Image (cartoon, rainbow, N blue to C red):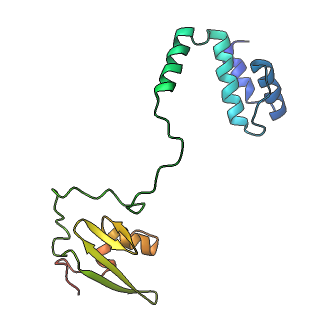
Amino acid sequence: MNVDQEIAALRRLSLPELRGRFARLFGEESQTTNNRIWLIKRLAWRMQAVAEGDLSQRARQRAAELADDANLRLGPPRPSRIASGSRPIPSPSRPWRSYAALRPGTVLTRPYKGQSLQVTVLKLGFQFEGVVYLSLSAVAKAITGSHCSGRLFFRLNGKGGAQ
């Protein structure tokens, strides 16, 4: 049987048979017990490596060098001051055309589900409950949980004033 046929035959094996095949090919027990797809992929890779030749010693050394030089993250990224779902704050060189009529320091108030919500307009964003958002739509999404127009949610007309 050639390698392609052997790999195709792996799909028909039971989980215990796959684990036994893994132990024979790798010389050790599999650390996974129920991940059938992972076992098939690892077995297929090993069968191809045995049949067609594994990586050369030079390639292995180069891979080890690259891994040593890699800047690997050892922990999760630090949370941003900008709320998730919003984009980074634009540079001051790009003025806000759509919100030009809203001056920094303006407080937008909106009754919603029995509460009075207040959003402060900043020079480069909007602050709601201590979190800075890029747009009113991002604020509205944080409040409602679904996407909606910030202008409509805060009941602003095209000129930035209240209706």
**Residue 120 higher or lower than 162, as above or below:** above
Q: Is residue 139 left or right of residue 28?
A: left
Q: Which residue is drawn at 75% across and 36% down?
A: 32
Q: Is residue 149 visible?
A: no
Count of number-bearing discs = 0
> In the picture provided, is 70 more to the left or to the right than 49?
left
Residue 24 location (% of width, % of height)? 80, 19
Q: Is residue 5 above or below residue 75?
A: above
Q: Is residue 90 above or below residue 74?
A: below
Figure quadrant of residue 91 = bottom left
Of residue 15 and residue 60, the one placed in the foreground of this image is 60
**Can residue 154 be seen in this snapshot?**
yes
Q: Which residue lies furthest to the bottom in this view?
A: 114
Residue 117, horizontal then vertical, whole percent:
38, 83
Whole-percent x and y of residue 95? 16, 62
Residue 4 percent across, percent down from the top left: 66, 18
Residue in view at x 69 percent, y 12 percent:
2
> As rendered, which of 68 and 103 lies closer to the eye?
68
**Which quarter of the figure is the C terminus placed in?**
bottom left
The residue shown at (69%, 17%) is 47
In this picture, residue 87 sits left or right of residue 10: left
Instruction: Check the picture and name the quadrant holding the N terminus.
Output: top right
Above or below residue 72? Residue 48 is: above
The residue that appears at 70% across and 24% down in the rendered structure is: 43
Q: In this view, does 127 lie to the left or right of 159?
A: right
Q: Residue 125: name its quadrant.
A: bottom left
